[in-house]
Image (cartoon, rainbow, N blue to C red):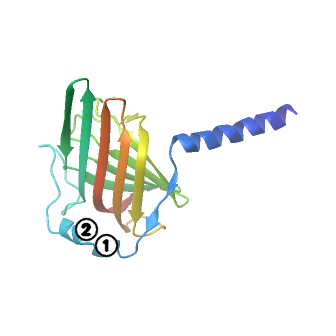
Amino acid sequence: MKLFLLLIGLLLTTFSCQRDQNFESFIVDKKLSTDDTIQLLSKYPELKLYNSEIVESKTRTAYIVQKAFYYDGPLKGSFLFEDYKCKAQYQNDTLNILLNNDNGYFGNGVLVKVFNNQFFIKDIDPKTLKGEKKFITSKVSGQKLILNTKTFKKNDSIYGFIDYKCHIDSLVYKHFRGYFKTTIQQN
């Protein structure tokens, strides 16, 4: 009986964790690589976000715009970020897509974890030490991910579109939207 209750508890914990992380299915669009914005990325050099950064791609890997709105009593405003880059690593059975604007000291972006034809998004905490990656909990109000394939291998090109909306806390709302492309690396 104790074993049965333990198994029920583990199953409930597993399913409740999945709901907390907002797992969703992504859309596959095999023609995504021909989208105008994806095509334009190849015409521009990759961003260099700090002087000593080693740029890994010759062409731009992402065009994502993040608008963050804040509400603090009578103060209201917004910030706009559009200096994002993309990296993708395939590790075991999970594709990790990092969309970030890390300048060597802090970053502001997301990590998209893709597996079993589903995904979830983790927000990167900008309050970190140099070289450190931390994540913050947010309340998702909408998310959409489109990829050009549902099978992933090292050295394959991956093309994508993301539209992600969340509340970081009661004062900050974030809308993160745009296109990305990169080559999948093995971790």
On screen, residue 103 above or below 142: above
Q: Residue at x 45, y 65 (%)?
A: 27
Q: Hey, which quadrant is residue 18 in on the image?
A: top right
Disc 2 is placed on an element classified as helix
15 left or right of 88? right
Looking at the picture, tell me which residue is in the foreground, 134 or 142: 142
Give the answer, above or below, for where 20 lies relative to 179.
above
**Residue 180 is drawn in which quadrant?**
bottom left
Q: Which residue is mark 1?
A: 33
- Up-down relation of residue 9 to residue 31 (above or below): above
Image side of residue 169 versus residue 21, left or right: left
Callout 1, which amino acid? Answer: Ser
Q: Position of residue 101 (x, y in %)?
A: 23, 45
Q: Quadrant of the N terminus?
A: top right
Mark 1 element type: helix
- The spot of residue 8 in percent (x, y) is 76, 39
Crowdedness near tag 2: few (<14), some (14–19) or many (≥20) residues, C-alpha within 10 Å: many
In this view, the residue in front, 85 or 137, is 137
Task: Specify the farthest residue to the front.
Answer: 74
Residue 38 - label: 2
Residue in the picture at 31% in, 72% down: 33
> Pointer 1: residues within 10 angstroms few (<14), some, or many (20+)?
some
Q: Position of residue 187 (x, y in %)?
A: 42, 52
Q: Amino acid at mark 2?
A: Ile
